[in-house]
Amino acid sequence: MLALLNVAQLVLYIALLALLGQGVLYLLAGAKRQTNLFYQLLQIVSKPFTVPVRKLTPAKVADRHVPVVTFFLLAIAYVVVTLEKINLCLSLGAGACR
């Protein structure tokens, strides 16, 4: 179970960093961000998370807001996984979580 929580935490962490990097490049690159190679790479990394969120959100939510919604949903999931990992480590003992 601990290994599963570690993998989930790592996947969420990578997705969160990709979305955060995408947001930073959104601010830095401006209108030319779509031609930026790193922005496109970060879009590819975060696409498995943004596509389902786009399908779940109502049509009133603009496409440009979907990465922000995805970031906050993943941040909530990351906190939940981290709390579950802490609870598991407390129940197993600190030695089992090293």
Image: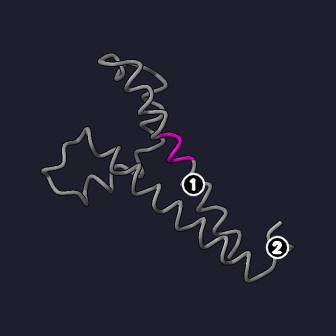
**Residue 38 magenta-highlighted:** no
Residue at figure coordinates x 35%, y 44% from the top left: 67
What's under tag 2, amino acid-wise? Ala
**Residue holding disc 2:** 94
On the image, the x and y values in percent for residue 2 come to 70, 72
- The relative height of residue 27 versus residue 72 in the rendered view (above or below) is above
Pointer 1 or 2: first along the chain: 1
Please give left or right for residue 57 compared with residue 50 in the image: left
On the image, the x and y values in percent for residue 58 come to 17, 57
**Residue holding disc 1:** 11
Q: Secondary structure at mark 1?
A: helix
- The relative height of residue 52 versus residue 97 in the rendered view (above or below) is above
Residue 1 occupies quadrant: bottom right
On the image, the x and y values in percent for residue 53 come to 31, 55
Residue 30 occupies quadrant: top left
Q: Which residues are magenta?
A: 14-18
Residue at figure coordinates x 83%, y 74% from the top left: 96
Q: Main secondary structure of the magenta part?
A: helix
Please give left or right for residue 74 compared with residue 1 in the image: left
Residue 19 occupies quadrant: top left
- Of the 4 image quadrants, the one containing the C terminus is bottom right
Please give left or right for residue 88 compared with residue 73 in the image: right
What's under tag 1, amino acid-wise? Val
State the residue lying farthest toward the bottom.
91
